Structures are given as C-alpha cells and as structure tokens.
Image: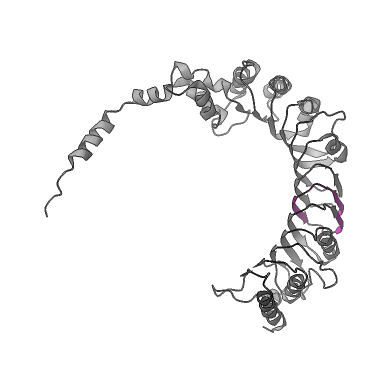
Amino acid sequence: MKSKPSNPLRGEATAMANSSTDSDLIDRLSDLPDALLITIISFLPTPIAARTSVLCRRFRHLWEASPSLELISKDYLFHSSAENFVAMANRALLNRNPSHPLQSLRLEVSHCDPCAKAMVSSLLARARSLDLRHLTMEDFWLSDFLPILPIVFTINSLRCLSLHLRSHSRQELNFPSGINLTCLRSLSLQLIAIDLADLNPLLSELCSLEDLYLRTTDTPKLSLSSQTIRKLKLIITNRTKNLDILELSLPSLELLHLEIQCNSGNLSHIYAKAPLLRKAVIKFSFFHERNASAVAGLLNCISHVEELSLHLVEFLQDENPIPILSGKDVPHFHNLKHLDVTLCFHQHNLAAVIMMLLNCPILKSLKLIFLTGLVRGKKREVWQSKLPQNADGNDRYAYFNNLHLEENRKEVIKLLSKKCSSKR
C-alpha cells in the first residue's frame, strides 16, 4: 500500500504547538485583570482556590479576595485539620480587606471541633460587617447553633439564608423576635429531630421573603401564613407522629411543591388559601384510604391552578383496591391546562381520572404514569395497570395532547372508559 503524503502545514502546526511552554500559559493568565481572575477563582471550592496561591507571586493573595467562601472544618476529601480551618478563616475572612466584598459564605463545622466552633461567632460578625448576601450553614447541631442564632438574624444585608440543623434528642426551636432582615428573599430550613415552634411570627417579620423551602420531621401540626411568599417547597416526613392539620394561608403564592410521607397513615385536614397559585406539585407516600378526604380537600382548595402534578403511592393492605378520589370529591378544574398523574392505575383510580377529564374544560395535555403501590397480599394481579397500551406496546405510560379539541377529548375519555370497564 502507498503511504499518504505528509501535509507540511500540519507538521508546522504540530511543531508550533510543541514549542509552547508552561510559562506561555502562565503569561496568558497574567494578561487577565485581577477582577476577572478573582471571579474565576470564586467558582472553585475554597480549599482548591487556596492552592492557586502557589502558581506565582501574583496569585499569592488573589484567592483571599474571592466573593464566595466555603469554610468547612471536616473536609474528608482534602483531610483538612482544625488548624487549617482556623488559618483559612483568618486569611480569607477575619483579616479580609474591607474593599473586597463578600457575597456568599458557607459554613460547616464539626460538632467535635471546639476550635472551629469557638470561631463561628467571630466569623459571622465579620461577615455582617462586609454586607454578606448569601449565608449557608450546613449540618449544624442545634446546641451549637442556639448561641449564634441572634447574630445570624441581625445580618441585615442577607438575601438568601439556608440553615440545616439537627439534634441528638428532640428539642424545640424558637426564633428570636425583633428580626430586621428586610432584604431577605429566600429562606431554606431543614430541621431534623427538631420540633418547629410557630413559624408565623418569623414569616411576618420577613417582609421581602418570596421563596421558602421547609423540610421537617414528625410535625403533628403545621401552619404557614405569609403575605409575600410566591414559591413554597414543603417536605414533611412523619415516622412516629400523625400529621393532623396542615394549613397554608399564602395569598401571593404562585408555585407550590408539597411532599408528605406519613408512615403512621393519619392525615386529617389540609387547607390552602392561595388564590394566585398557578402550578402545584403534590406528592404523598404511604397513602391510606383514610387520607382520601384530606387530599380531596386540598385539590378543591387549589382547583384554580393551570398546571398540576399529582403523585400518590398507595399503601395497599386489603385484597380490594380503594379509590383515591370518589366521584363526589373530584373538583372542577376550570383553568387546568396540563395534568400529570402518577399512581397505581387500577379500575377505581382510572375512573377518577376520567372524572377529572370531564371536570377540566380547557385541558391541553394529560400524562399518566403507572406506579405499583406498596402491595401486601397474594392477589397482586388486582392492582395491574388498567392504562391502554401506548405506541411502545406497554401499559405503564400514557400521554395525550390537544385535549382542548372536543373530538380528541371525547376519544380519550372513550378509550379510558373502555379500559376501565374491561376485565383482565
């Protein structure tokens, strides 16, 4: 075989590439202004950003001016010691040049690290003087957090606050009064083994709050009231207690994501006042027959939504499946355009979907996903999917669009009704 003739241009390009040295690359970085280099460094985790100080003399202190800091006293990836944490906190925060703004601070301090815990108050006070905007405190024990709680809620420049708290034994968390966080837009609370006291006094003082994320465990009663919240993500996990009452009074709410997992099975009452709600995602795990009225009550409260995603995992103990929604409980969705339903589509639940179709006059799309419930018993075939087979030849997923056209809607209702009445 004849060899291909070599390309002289390609050989010249290869030679030029090989002639480049590391110093050329460093010189190219050196051509960038300090402000741009600091911005690039701010995207790195602080332990890695600190390592740029060995590149050259110019980089020695650039990382200390990063507007984003992560101070972690337990870093298993880099095996940071308490001494390294203290040194890094001193250089990057406590001795920070006031001309270098601090926008974001993430603190994670080991419960068994007394040196790091002793510095937290000083770090927060220094961050407050630098007009901190975003504060995240990860995996703090409540006993360590309570002494610094007043400092956190006096950082008036905060836009976003995220607190992840846990407790060895169940304790009650009470927020201080006289809070003046007038700029706070987003609040995230993850509380593990902590009894949440009344949150409404805190919400009433956060006059600019728009986004709330709340995750709590074993809460028997929860009431949320705010005039400003527009987006809410609420996750409730009750393993030992019943969730008796859930009340939401949020007149400005537009987006709702609600997840409830009640292993004990009792869910008495859900009330929601949200006249501006446009989109809702509702998820229930360990769903029992006695929860059906509470879910129906919630759906009637939010029947004006435009998009609805309903995800229910049934707890099926009996041999006969139960209806998630009975005909009289299915609300009329006059504004609903997009509906996603994920549940065990046995005969009764398919009938409920047909009823929802009849009650949604302007619905455009319908997505149905079959999900086997938590079945206990021998006759598992009772809960086999009743969905019609789709183009892929399976009956675990169905999608219908253009349902705002009357002929399409009638055809889908006829198809589902036929599957609902058919015997397997």
Which percent across, then down, holds residue 382?
71, 77
Specify whether residue 264 is painted magenta. yes
Please give left or right for residue 396 compared with residue 297 in the image. left
Q: Quadrant of the C terminus?
A: bottom right
User: What kind of colouring is applied to the model shown?
Assistant: one colour
Residue drawn at point x = 60 percent, y = 76 percent: 389
Which percent across, then down, holds residue 251?
83, 48
Residue furthest toward the front?
405
Front residue of 116 and 44: 44
Q: What secondary structure is the magenta-colored segment mainly?
A: strand
- Asked which quadrant contains residue 72, the reply is top right
Front residue of 285 and 416: 416
Specify whether residue 136 is painted magenta. no
Front residue of 210 and 370: 210
Asked if residue 83 can be seen in this view, the reply is no
Which percent across, then down, holds residue 230?
76, 45
Relative height, residue 187 to residue 352 (above, below): above
Residue drawn at point x = 82 percent, y = 73 percent: 327
Residue furthest toward the bottom?
423
Front residue of 205 and 247: 205
Which percent across, then down, holds residue 82?
62, 23
How many numbered marks appear?
Answer: 0
Q: Quadrant of the N terminus?
A: bottom left
Relative height, residue 221 to residue 200 (above, below): below
- Asked which quadrant contains residue 138, the reply is top right
Please give left or right for residue 136 compared with residue 26 in the image. right
Q: Which residues are magenta?
A: 242-271
Relative height, residue 41 to residue 227 (above, below): above
Please give left or right for residue 347 compared with residue 21 in the image. right
Asked if residue 59 can be seen in this view, the reply is yes
